[in-house]
Image: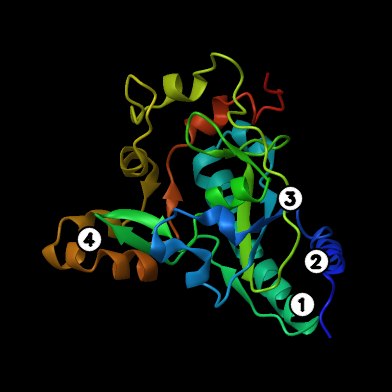
Amino acid sequence: MSFKEESLKQAISDFLKPQVTDLGFAPVDRFAGVPEAHHPACICRNAKTVIVFGITVPRGMLKSPDYNLYALHRTYHSAYTRIDHIALSLCNYIESLGRYLAVPAPSYAPMVFHQFEPWGLLSLKHAAVNAGLASFGRSGQAYHPRYGSLLRLGAVVTDAVIEADPMLSPDPCPPNCAACMKSCPAKAFDQDGNFNKMTCLGHTIKHAIYPLALSSETGLKNIERVINTAGHNYWIGCDECLKVCPLNLGKKSG
């Protein structure tokens, strides 16, 4: 027996709420125009709904004296592990409710590389925006109305039809705010405020395997395999944009 659309949404919400900070539901038609290889239908056959959820990392780590090495490094990876466990449990729960299929989207790895630029199998930032969980700020990050960009994201794609949540208003940033752009040590923003992801990643992500892979012809040829098998447990060497963002410091936009 399958649930009615409203009852299924309530059942999933009741299952998730004790485990996550917030959640939202996005119909697959909101993903029209995304690259074909990153569409929800590539994750789940006959996909109809993407369920997006997030858990927060503590705001206190932004002020940690050993922020990069201890707070951020382990906190992020612990969050991703927990998110993957929640997603797997949610899939099993959904499939126990009726003739539904559900597949978890990876919270981080594996990644697909296009022109040496890493992409997730499903863009969780876009999924969060489509599910009414966040909106894009000027830095290109997805900002939750209460928790800013401190929400780590996970998602499950299912063939169940579930009522969508309304999307949030665009541009959550305070008027005339450019704190992230001014603080960026990598100069990843150009004069017009456009963000270059690879400039940021080159400065931020630290791992012993990266310089070896990038300096080797074999490493470059097999960069996707190298990163997904040996390089995803990285050390984050910078997150200045998170530290200075007023939305991450508990200040409201507008």
The residue type indicated by label 2 comes to Ile
Q: Is residue 99 left or right of residue 128?
A: right
Precedes in sequence: disc 1 or disc 3: 1
Mark 2 lies on residue? 12
Q: How crowded is mark 3: few (under 14 residues within 10 Å), some or many (20 or more)?
A: some
* Residue located 72% across and 27% down the image: 250
Measure the C-alpha gap from mark 2 to mark 1.
8 Å
Precedes in sequence: disc 1 or disc 4: 1
Image height check: is 123 above or below 252? Answer: below
Q: In this view, does 75 lie to the left or right of 206?
A: right
The residue type indicated by label 4 comes to Ala
* Image marks 1 and 4: residues in contact by CB distance under 8 Å: no
**What is the x, y in percent for residue 228?**
38, 67
**What is the x, y in percent for residue 111?**
40, 63
Residue 219 lies in quadrant: bottom left
* Residue located 79% across and 62% down the image: 16
User: Marks 1 and 3: which is nearer the front?
Assistant: 3
Residue ranking furthest to the top: 176
Mark 4 lies on residue? 213
Residue 165, labelled with which disc?
A: 3
Q: How crowded is mark 4: few (under 14 residues within 10 Å), some or many (20 or more)?
A: some
The residue type indicated by label 1 comes to Tyr
Precedes in sequence: disc 2 or disc 1: 2
Mark 1 lies on residue? 93
**What is the x, y in percent for residue 83?**
64, 62
Of 219 and 49, the residue lying toward us: 49
* Image marks 2 and 1: residues in contact by CB distance under 8 Å: yes
Q: Is mark 4 on a helix, strand or loop?
A: helix
Residue 177 lies in quadrant: top right
